Image (cartoon, grey):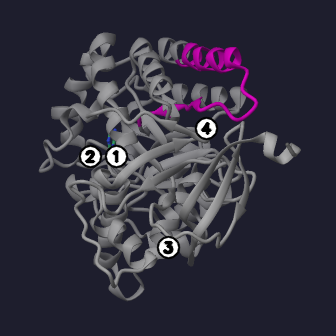
Amino acid sequence: MSSFASSISKVFYGTFIHSVSIKEIEYVPNGLLFVDAHGRIAKIVRNVPKDQFRGALDGVEEYKHAPQFAYCGNGHDIPLLEWLDTLTFPHEAKFKDASYARRVYTKAVARSLRNGTTSACWFATIHLDATKELVKVIEEQGQRAYVGKVNMNQNSPDFLKETTQSSVADTRAFIEYVNAINDAQGFDTKPLVTPIITPRFAISCTSDLLTELGKLAAEFDIPVQSHLCENLKEIEFTKSLFPNSTDYTSVYADHGLLTHRSIMAHCVHMKDEELQLMKDKGAGVSHCASSNFNIKSGLANVRKMVDMDLKVGLGTDVAGGFSSSILDAFRTARTCSIARSPADSLLVPELFYLATVGGARVMELEDTIGNFVVGKEFDAILVNTAAKYSPLDVFEHDTICTKFEKYLFVGDDRNNEKVYVQGKEVRLPDV
Ligand code: GUN
């Protein structure tokens, strides 16, 4: 056996569809894709005869709140700050109980994987034990994920408020917990689970706490996620709490929390200087159009972000958003863009890029995942357009391109026959 053959652990045959640039989707019919023992793409051979459509699509990134999955679909008539007080905070208090957390997280992660999300950024709650439980569930189910223990030490109800000291100590303990699991596994590829610093938003953290979290991000060289410029009242309140910062985005920058590893959800109401600051720092945006419609935050100007080559990925933001599906995020991002400005709205290849490569860039994983390139890890969805109960119909006139378009606009998790993370098929749980 040649050394190439002996290094290969899996070979896939079919139609491969991925984003090669913000302007271009590549269709690889009759392709052969070889994956090595580390789950990396070793070789792609195009146009190997034998026709069938059971294409593989590259996977995606999304951001969401794992605990909020329990009331996904509820409470959409309430704007952000009231929504947090009436729905979110009382519910999150229940995650003091790690066994309740396990039940909700098991469903939340399963639903996310079923929908084809190979990589996710998760917000947990302030609770250390429940956040560890989320890591265990993700490890069991095999998703690639950034997981954050949320920090909150002000402007939060007493039943969901930490002290600065306990918040920092528990965050450190959480990071060390994840790092120890990763060290024990002795990865020769990137570990699948990464801890992420997660101040809920500037309103819920004092300047002291933000400073300490910035130091932890630097000490462990780990990513940061938070919310930014989602809602007008939120922005006003933030400015009143941090009068020494030029604007909301600068609050994070001033505390060492805006870096090339930062992911800011929403960014709906950004001044040009704030977008420029994000770009200068190399930070990325998680565009959560569904949530921004549902809880009435507004329409983010993603065209402007894309044109200035700011990093942008798509987020589902359950439970602000009502769907765990990145396909829904794709569709709602398109509607948002058209509603803002039909003449220069985002086109399908651009949106597909945001759902795949864009997400990888935001997670600073563009050298690892995002599309099918030799050397990257094989994260993919096997799509079957003719699946039982498929919501889309295929006719003789359909081509690979029209079938793919139908999947993007009409398909759902029933079309996701298999999901692969780092070259391994994940067991798709029933949800
Ligand atoms: N801002 C602060 N917390 C939250 C949250 O849980 N969801 C959303 N959408 N925005 C937030």
Q: Nearer the viewer, residue 171 or 154?
A: 171
Which region shows up in magenta?
A: 171-200
**Mark 2 C-beta to ligand 1 under 8 Å:** yes
Label 3 belongs to which residue? 350
Q: Are marks 2 and 4 in contact (CB under 8 Å)?
A: no
Under mark 4, the amino acid is: Pro
In the image, which disc is placed on residue 177?
none
Indicate the secondary structure of the residue bearing disc 3: helix
Mark 4 or 1, nearer chain start: 4
**Spatial distance from mark 3 to mark 1, Cα to Cα?**
20 Å
How many C-alpha atoms fall within 10 Å of the one at disc 3: few (<14), some, or many (≥20)? many
Under mark 3, the amino acid is: Glu
Q: Quadrant of ligand 1?
A: top left
Under mark 1, the amino acid is: Asp
Q: Position of residue 327 (x, y in %)?
A: 35, 59
Q: Nearer the viewer, residue 418 or 255?
A: 418
**Spatial distance from mark 2 to mark 4, Cα to Cα?**
23 Å
**Spatial distance from mark 4 to mark 1, Cα to Cα?**
18 Å
Label 4 belongs to which residue? 223
**Mark 1 C-beta to ligand 1 under 8 Å:** yes
How many C-alpha atoms fall within 10 Å of the one at disc 1: few (<14), some, or many (≥20)? many
Compared with 393, 284 (above or below) is above
Between tags 2 and 3, which lies in front?
A: 3
Q: Are marks 4 and 1 in contact (CB under 8 Å)?
A: no
Magenta residue check for 69: no
